[in-house]
Amino acid sequence: MTRAGAFALALLATLAVPAAASARTAAAPETIAHRADLGGGPVRAAAPFDFLGVQWRGPREGVAVRLRRAGRWGAWRALHAGDVHRPGRHASDLLPAGGATAYQVRLPAGARDGRASAITVPADARARASAPAPPAGLPVRHCTRTRAQWGADESLRFAPDGTEIWPPAYFRVQKLTVHHTVTEGGAAGAGDPAAIVRAIYRYHAVELGFGDIGYQLLVDANGCIYEGRHSGPDDVPVYAARTADGSTPLAVNAGHTAGYNAGNVGVALLGDFTGQQPTARARAGLVRALAALARTSGLDPLGSGLYVNPINGFTKDVPTITGHRDWLATECPGDELYPLLPDIRRAVAGLVAS
């Protein structure tokens, strides 16, 4: 079998969606963001919100936030710079807000240019009805969501003049990096993973100015895989296109590991795994996604070696399947998920071999 044939089997057999499902293109409820410049005092949002993201310049640590729910202020909690950021600015991960109506952000000495985005994400009952979770106890197979299925508003990728904000670039895949999104517990999103994906998309594409979501793939607690970064007009997620000449397909560049993105595919589990482990189904979905990527790109899931960024020349000697903290000083993908990576690598290798 040619490499192109293996690519079609590896990727489409695990990540492709049934034709009937992919036909659903009805628009999802609009994701709304209320932006405010931070002056130190409380900010009342235009509507109850599900997630809060904060950007700032200056010290990386020392930012804190509190939320107001049901007429009461909650305790102050620390915010940390998250997975993604804009050049010269720090940005938190999305903080679950649970229908809060107001917030207050405390910046440390030396921090400036603070900005917050309160994001309201209505649940999409149609999406949940058209894609029920598999029965308990059964393995998750072919549980995938295209951008159309999870309700991506493709207009967010374009500037007012019609130009694409973040044009795709494609590179040979060298590494696969596991993340967590730290978004578990949003009011609307708690029962609708697609709403969480839409919130992350809005935050990355518009609030942070990327023009798209920063991960190539995402996985929910049921093990369903979500197409992330837009990779082109064809039906193949992550990669440029099916190849006809037997060459290894190239993957679209994304924005999940600053300085080490080109040739590095980011897969994010929805949730916060600082103090709890992902579900068995989430792990199974992650293994499926990583196995499809490894087989398609010709990677050894148990391997290790030097990564070389083809854009900036940055290098790093890391395993083929890494956690975000293997690259940068971060807690991602969480203290409960990161130690599972050796078992995940072995499971991926077994699935690739089979």
Image (cartoon, grey):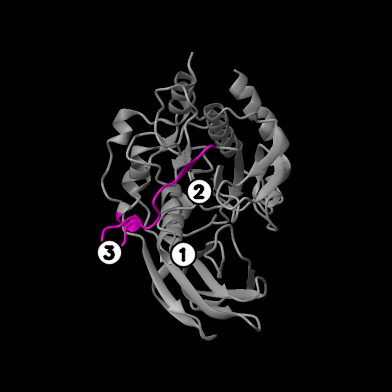
Spatial CA span between label 1 and label 3: 17 Å
Q: Which mark is residue 144?
A: none
**In the rendered image, which quarter is residue 29 located in?**
bottom left
* Frontmost residue, 236 versus 348: 236
Q: Amino acid at mark 1?
A: Leu
Query: In this orientation, does residue 75 appear?
Result: no
**Type of amino acid at the residue the image marks with label 2:** Tyr
Residue 321 sits in quarter: top right
Nearer the observer: mark 3 or 2; the answer is 3
Contact? badges 3 and 2 (CB < 8 Å): no
Percent from the top left, x then y, of residue 320?
66, 36
Q: Which mark is residue 160?
A: 3
The residue stretch that appears in magenta: 155-172
The number of numbered discs placed on residues in the rendered structure image is 3
The residue identified by callout 2 is 215
The answer to whether residue 154 of the structure is visible from this angle is yes
For the point 61% across and 30% down, the residue is 299
Relative to 288, residue 66 above or below: below
